[in-house]
Image (cartoon, grey):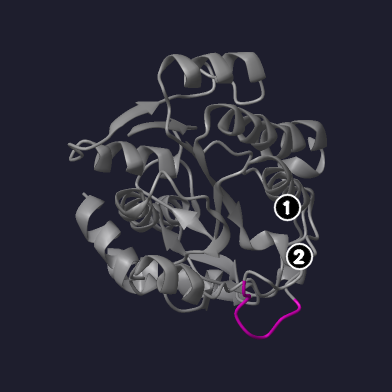
Amino acid sequence: MNILVTGSSGQLGSELKVLSKGSVSHKFFFSVYHDLDITAHDCVYSFCRDHAIDVIVNCAAYTAVDKAESDVRNAFLVNSAGPAVLAECARKINALLIHFSTGYVFDGHSSTPYCEIDPASPISVYGKSKWEGEERIREIAPSYLIIRTSWLYSVYGNNFVKTMIRLGAEREQLNVVFDQIATPTHAADLAQAIISILELYEPDCLYQETYHYTNEGACSWYDVAAAIMEIAKLPCKVIPVETAHYPRPALRPNYSVLNNSAIERDWGLEFPDWKTSLTKMLKTHLP
């Protein structure tokens, strides 16, 4: 198959690029914004047609949660209008569209892991833009997989884990919120899940599914930061604080743990424990 990966310079796209080097059955095309603007229909369609694309994997996203509150137009342009363009192009060339969304489409009022059929009620511009992107794909694309994930991190790009490593080496103490609960997800694990799905994908079938994929378990940002200091052997002390004491422009759901059972049932995927994957990433890439 010919597979287009958009947003390939980000965390997930970069991990897919690494894994694609071992593929002998697929040809991957990796694009970034300057090469292929996902909001430009004619450019995307021409590229997909000329390269006989069979699957579009959309890793492009506006992920600056706080900035989105004041940059509403661009957040919706990338997270909603862009996926709509990709869905329309996928329809025209009869391709599968794999798109990634977020647990921030939920309001966080649940006390049990969210299932795919639970009603969305985003409380931030970022969450609303991602939810609208999901809905536009469902309206337009004949064959799609929407995969929600949470708290993505990687050795590539900017993320909470890399920030904590840097600050932990610079400071004696850090305040980190303890009342936001979800699951950190190693982008390398999600990328491997996508490769597994591509191997099982049947081009003659239509897929219209929304799934959740995260690492296993649940924790707070404080738990993650404390684990980082422990694994990296940094002397920085992590102090738990309430979200109310650390105001941000965008509201976050207090609880956004996702239930992975549907994608496990349909695709036979495995979900490493969050701390196991974090340890592996840190031990592999720490100097």
Label 1 sits on residue: 131
Give the residue displayed 28% in from the left and 58% down from the top.
Answer: 282
Question: Quick one: SS at disc 1?
Answer: helix
Closer to the camera in the image, 201 or 135 = 201
Q: Residue furthest bottom?
A: 111
Question: Quick one: SS at disc 2?
Answer: loop
Q: Give the answer, above or below, for where 202 lies relative to 25.
A: below
Give the residue displayed 71% in from the left and 68% down from the top.
Answer: 253
Q: Quadrant of residue 197?
A: bottom left
User: Does the magenta-highlighted stretch encompass residue 77?
Assistant: no
Mark-to-mark CA distance, 1 and 2: 8 Å
Label 2 sits on residue: 120
Q: Please indicate whether residue 95 sits to the left or right of residue 40 in the image.
A: left
For the question of whether residue 35 can be seen, the reply is: no
Position in image of residue 9 (x %, y %)? 43, 31
Tell me whether circle 1 and circle 2 mark residues in contact (CB < 8 Å): yes
For the question of whether residue 220 can be seen, the reply is: yes
SS assignment for the magenta stretch, majority: loop
Give the residue displayed 72% in from the left and 41% down from the top.
Answer: 67
The magenta span reads 109-115
Give the residue displayed 32% in from the left and 34% down from the top.
Answer: 1
Q: Give the amino acid at mark 2.
A: Ala
